[in-house]
Every structure is written in structure tokens, then in C-alpha cells.
Image (cartoon, rainbow, N blue to C red):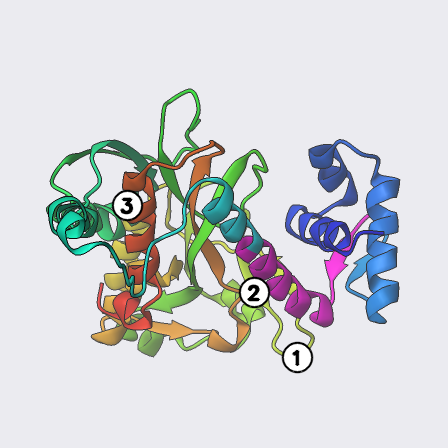
């Protein structure tokens, strides 16, 4: 059985929570997915998933393997995108030779054009509203300064946009990708953590484990299933239901409430990094943090990826790869 299919099946089941969901996505029966998982676990000699008729739980070994597999599959997607979509970025030293007279007249001028080539055309982007305001819009300004012949339309929305029907060149998304019809390029990763103001923690105490959250005022995001934690001893990831006096469907409001000392909030580092660095917020339950979420550039499959899209994705990857970037934004 193909090893890549086994790995792909494992990642799909682990991220979707069931064999049935993974099977529907691929258009096969759950039994086929199950056989792939069995073959993978037998080949590795470890149990990756604990499966019953009612519940699926990822083991400690499975969680560690999942993170490696996700990186592997994303690296593979990046490589395929770079080759098949024309996404190879030129770099390094190019040494040329030409006849003296011909080279002076007909090669030297073209070398100058080659080195100064900029992208052009219209670039339509989409990103989550809060993340886009802080971490995409400023980079759009830098990108346009370096590529003055490009015009940009940035759509900030927390809904999942239809890239094809809305003519989106590239969307920035956070979390594991589920749409196999799109190409996704991993730009970086983002941790989520529980934070509160120092004043709140002095007044109400510091939770030491997720069970302690029942005694705290938790600032909840509307429609959120709960807060995700990973047991530092077993490695098992679970979702805890939380409750409190404050609930809102806008993460920025929860951030402001946390700063005002109203309770604990489960927020992403991209949002609270500066507050943590400058002492306005403090993180708790750090040992229980779940695995980081991926930040992705997503775009439709096509024969040729325009230079403007490739260059913008390169800028995002280069910027987001710097750990210090998230600490000061």
C-alpha cells in the first residue's frame, strides 16, 4: 500500500475527527481509510489513534507524528506548486558568456531588464479581518512599494470566501486546510494561549490546569466549541467547555475585555504578542498549550501562477518566519 496514502489518510482522520469524514472527502468507504490506518500503525509499530464506535482519540505518539506529517504534506504541496505552477523563485549567481560585440548590443541590455523585472497587474487578496488588519495590510503597503505596477484589492472577512467564484488570487487562512481542490502554502504557525491582565490574576488567582477554569470568568467567543489543550503528560488533546459573564462574537472585543481585567481569554499570539511583551497581559496554562495552528496562503490550482502572487507569498513567508515579528506586533 502506498505510504503517502497511509500518511494522508492519518492526517485527514486526525484533523477531521472521524473515518467517515475523511472517507467522504476522498470519495471512498470508511473501511478503506481504516485499512490504511491499520497498515500505517503496523508498519510503524505504534498506536496512533485510539478508535471506538463512539470516539476517536489521538495518542501522544500520534500527535507528534501528526505534526511531522502535516509539515511533510505541506512541503510536498509547496514543491508541487513551485514546479507545476511556475512558482520557482530565481536566486543565486548567474554567469553568462556571449560574443563581445553582440553581447554589448543585445545581451547586456536584456540582463538589466532581467534584474529589474517587477510584477504588474491586479492582485486580489482575502484574509481574516483582525489578522488581516494587523499582519496583511501593512505588508501590502511594503509589497506595492517594491512593485509599483501592481494594484491590490484586499478583502477582510472572517467568512471562508469562494476563491473561484469571487476571483480571489490568494487567501490567507489560519488552521488546518480541508479543501483539497486548492493549493496551500504554509507561511508559518501560530500558538493560542490563555491570557489575562496581571490585575485579574492577582484578584482571582492563577489556574494551574484546565479544570481550574470552572472557577474563573472566561471570556467566550460566540459559537466557539471550547478551548483546546494538550495534556503535558499524556499528550492527549481535548476541548474544555468554558463559561463566564462575558461573551462576544468579535475576538477584538475579547482582547479589550482581557486588557480591562474582565477575565481570561484564549487568544492567538499574533493578537496579544505585544501585550505580553510589555506586561499588559500574562499567559497562563502554558504547559497545556495545544499544537500550533498553521498559517497558509491558499490559491486555486492553475497552470501558471502570476509573478505578483508568487512575490507576495514570498514576502509573507519571509516575514512570518521571523519569531521576533510576532512579539512586537
User: In which quadrant of the rendered view does residue 61 lie?
Assistant: bottom right
Per the image, label 1 sits on a secondary structure element best described as loop
Given residues 290 and 72, the one toward you in this image is 72
Given residues 54 and 307, the one toward you in this image is 307
Q: Residue at x 28, y 47 (%)?
A: 312
The Cα–Cα distance between marks 3 and 2, rounded to whole angstroms, is: 26 Å
Q: Quadrant of the C terminus?
A: bottom left
Res. 236 in view = no
Q: Nearer the viewer, mark 3 or mark 2?
A: 3
Per the image, label 2 sits on a secondary structure element best described as strand
**Residue range highlighted in magenta:** 53-75
Q: Is residue 285 above or below residue 308?
A: below
Res. 254 in view = yes
Given residues 81 and 259, the one toward you in this image is 81
The numbered mark, 3 or 1, whose residue comes first in the sequence reads 3
Q: Which mark is residue 132?
A: 3
Q: Position of 238 compared to 3: left or right?
A: left
Magenta span dominant secondary structure:
helix
Per the image, label 3 sits on a secondary structure element best described as helix
Q: Which mark is residue 233?
A: 1
User: Answer yes or no: do the residues labelled 3 and 1 have beta carbons within 8 Å?
Assistant: no
* 10 Å crowding of disc 3: few (<14), some (14-19), many (20+): many
The Cα–Cα distance between marks 2 and 1, rounded to whole angstroms, is: 12 Å
Q: Which residue is mark 2?
A: 229
Q: Residue 104 location, x and y as percent?
A: 12, 51
Q: Residue at x 20, y 75 (%)?
A: 278
Q: Position of 311 compared to 46: left or right?
A: left
Q: Residue 317 location, x and y as percent?
A: 35, 57
The numbered mark, 3 or 2, whose residue comes first in the sequence reads 3
Q: Position of 155 compared to 287: left or right?
A: left
Q: Residue 192 location, x and y as percent?
A: 43, 62
Amino acid at each position: 500500500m502506498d505510504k503517502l496514502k497511509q500518511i494522508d489518510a492519518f492526517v485527514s482522520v486526525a484533523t477531521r475527527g472521524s473515518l467517515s469524514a475523511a472517507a467522504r472527502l476522498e470519495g471512498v468507504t470508511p473501511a478503506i481509510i481504516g485499512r490504511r490506518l491499520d497498515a500505517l500503525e503496523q508498519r510503524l509499530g505504534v498506536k496512533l489513534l485510539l478508535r471506538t464506535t463512539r470516539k476517536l482519540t489521538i495518542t501522544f505518539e500520534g500527535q507528534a507524528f501528526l505534526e511531522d506529517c502535516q509539515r511533510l504534506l505541506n512541503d510536498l504541496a509547496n514543491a508541487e506548486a513551485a514546479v507545476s505552477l511556475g512558482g520557482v523563485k530565481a536566486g543565486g549567481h548567474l554567469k553568462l558568456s556571449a560574443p563581445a560585440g553582440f553581447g554589448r548590443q543585445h545581451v547586456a541590455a536584456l540582463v538589466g531588464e532581467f534584474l529589474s523585472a517587477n510584477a504588474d497587474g491586479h492582485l486580489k487578496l482575502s484574509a481574516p479581518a483582525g489578522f488581516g488588519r494587523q499582519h496583511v495590510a501593512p505588508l501590502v503597503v511594503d509589497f506595492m512599494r517594491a512593485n509599483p505596477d501592481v494594484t491590490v484589492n484586499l478583502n477582510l472577512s472572517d467568512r471562508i470566501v469562494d476563491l473561484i467564484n469571487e476571483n480571489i488570487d490568494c487567501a490567507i487562512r489560519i488552521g488546518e486546510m480541508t479543501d483539497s481542490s486548492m493549493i496551500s502554502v504554509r507561511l508559518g504557525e501560530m500558538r493560542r494561549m490563555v491570557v489575562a491582565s496581571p490585575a485579574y490574576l492577582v484578584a482571582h488567582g492563577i489556574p494551574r490546569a484546565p479544570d481550574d477554569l470552572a472557577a474563573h470568568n472566561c471570556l467566550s467567543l460566540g459559537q466557539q466549541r471550547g478551548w483546546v489543550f494538550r495534556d503535558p503528560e499524556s499528550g492527549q488533546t481535548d476541548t474544555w467547555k468554558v463559561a463566564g459573564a462575558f461573551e462576544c462574537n468579535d475576538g477584538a472585543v475579547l482582547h479589550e475585555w482581557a486588557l480591562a481585567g474582565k477575565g481570561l481569554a484564549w487568544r492567538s499570539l499574533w493578537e496579544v504578542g505585544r501585550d505580553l511583551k510589555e506586561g499588559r497581559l500574562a499567559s497562563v496554562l502554558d504547559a497545556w498549550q495545544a499544537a500550533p495552528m498553521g498559517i497558509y496562503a491558499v490559491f486555486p490550482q492553475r497552470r501558471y501562477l502570476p509573478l505578483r502572487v508568487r512575490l507576495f507569498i514570498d514576502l509573507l513567508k519571509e516575514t512570518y518566519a521571523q519569531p521576533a515579528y510576532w512579539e512586537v506586533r
